[in-house]
Amino acid sequence: MSKFSPFCWCFLFLFAFSSVQAGISRVAVTVKSVDLSPKAAPKGKPKEEKPEVEKRQLEIKIRNISQLSLDGLLVKYYFLGHAAGNSTIKILSEGEKSQSLAPGAEAIVTSDTATATFTPAHTPKSKGKARPQRVKADGDKFSGWAVRVLSDGVLQTENYSTPSVKAVLPPVEQQAAPVTTPVR
């Protein structure tokens, strides 16, 4: 006689069947955003408003969590931001790098440096009696990042600074096919 009730057998069967059909990524990814911006000058009364320069880089750690060698992985990264006076997010910079991973191996992919320049709204000092005109804010500011890992054009995994940035990115043609493992 079996030690499991019919309910337990049913549950075990459903669990085994669902894990076979579920799409399981073979790659894990973690991302660290690194701020490379020059240090700001001490606050005081500036003679003229200078643009703020932001520089960012991503350290992308990818890990092969399968028992197969993954050759030709394509790591795509995006820096996202918005224009001055506008809250609509757009792609400021993007890039891609290739990587191969042995089973259980991990690698760190460093993105190219992205730069965004922003000049805040300001009123220049007046010369003479003429009243100066206010200058509107200009440029772009960073607001997030996104990373996608593809294998042969098929999306394996993706990671975002916030879920809302996914809507800004170009669509991916194919999702990863379900990884099937034989049931014994």
Image (spheres, grey):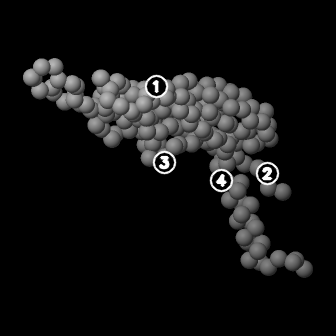
Front residue (pair 152, 49) = 49
Q: Label 2 vs label 1: CA separation?
A: 48 Å
Residue 22: assigned label: 4
Q: Which comes before the other along the chain, label 1 or label 4?
A: 4
Tag 2: amino acid: Pro
Q: Is 38 placed above or below 9 here?
A: above
Q: Which comes before the other along the chain, label 4 or label 2?
A: 4
Residue named by callout 1: 115
Front residue (pair 99, 87) = 87
Q: Which comes before the other along the chain, label 3 or label 1?
A: 1
Q: Nearer the viewer, mark 2 or mark 1?
A: 1
Tag 1: amino acid: Thr
Residue named by callout 3: 163
**Please, which residue is most extreme toward the right here?**
1
Q: Quadrant of the C terminus?
A: bottom right
Choose top left, top right, bottom left or bottom right for residue 20. Answer: bottom right
Residue drawn where x is 74% and y is 43% of the image? 65
Q: Quadrant of the N terminus?
A: bottom right
**Please, which residue is most extreme toward the left here?**
129
Q: Label 4 vs label 2: CA separation?
A: 13 Å
Q: Which comes before the other along the chain, label 2 or label 1?
A: 1
Tag 4: amino acid: Ala
Q: Are marks 2 and 1 in contact (CB under 8 Å)?
A: no
Label 2 secondary element = loop
Numbered-mark total: 4
Q: Residues within 10 Å of mark 1 (few under 14, many from 20)?
A: some
Q: Where residue 85 sits: x, y (%)? A: 28, 37
